[in-house]
Image (spheres, helix red, strand yellow):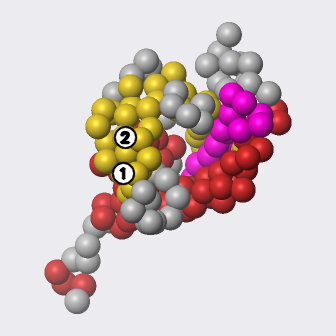
Amino acid sequence: MGTTAEARGFTGEATFRTDRVLRHAPAIVFAAFARRDLLAHWWGPNGFTNTFDTFEFRPGGRWTFVMHGPDGSHHRNESVFLAVEAPSSVVVQHVSAPRFVLTVTLAPHDQGTALTWVQVFEDASVAARVRHIVEPANEENLDRLAAVLADLAAATQPGPEAGDA
């Protein structure tokens, strides 16, 4: 049996899915998940920052961190990386409440990378209670990812030649 959320037996009524095309190659998008410094910068909805305690980006690796909300709140998170397949997928099991599995797939697209984000909650009633938070937060999360990728691309672009001025 696979490690995707669906393969782990979670039901469709507890699923949130977002699809996005990002204007960067899959390897670059994957790096934004694999690099602790980049992930800490974009993970979470608008206004949130992160402090990573443990980040073992490998199958079976632990990921513990605190999300700091714009209202001063602190949200401890604990996850396990179920699968890490460069540059095409990352599967994360959020083992602290609320429990869910997030499967991110990255596929080449003529405009960069087609990203599919599937978050499946263990408990459909919990998913129903948090739907109004999760759906917009996931979109904000991917907006922040796109911004980090744009900054990364701009930082790696060669500057103007001295004679171009």
Residue at image position (66%, 43%) is 116
- Residue 50, labelled with which disc? 1
The picture quadrant where one finds residue 10 is top right
Using the numbered discs, state the Cα–Cα distance from disc 2 to disc 1 in whole angstroms: 7 Å
- Disc 2 vs disc 1: Cβ atoms closer than 8 Å? yes
Q: Farthest residue toward the right?
A: 13
Residue 64 percent location from the top left of the image: 37, 34
Given residues 10 and 157, the one toward you in this image is 10
Question: Would you say 94 lies left or right of 163 here?
Answer: right
Badge 2 amino acid: Phe
Q: Which residues are magenta?
A: 109-126
Residue at image position (49%, 53%) is 44
Residue 161 percent location from the top left of the image: 22, 77
Question: Would you say 143 lies left or right of 66 here?
Answer: right
CA neighbours of label 2 inside 10 A, class few (<14), some (14 to 19), many (20+): some
Of callouts 2 and 1, the N-terminal one: 1
Residue 141 percent location from the top left of the image: 54, 56
CA neighbours of label 1 inside 10 A, class few (<14), some (14 to 19), many (20+): some
Badge 1 amino acid: Asn
Placement of 13 over or under 140, stated as above or below: above
Tell me, yes or no, whether the highlighted magenta stretch contains residue 164.
no
Q: Which residue is mark 2?
A: 65
Main secondary structure found in the magenta portion: strand
- Specify the quadrant that holds the C terminus: bottom left
Tell me, yes or no, whether the highlighted magenta stretch contains residue 112.
yes
- Specify the quadrant that holds the N terminus: top right
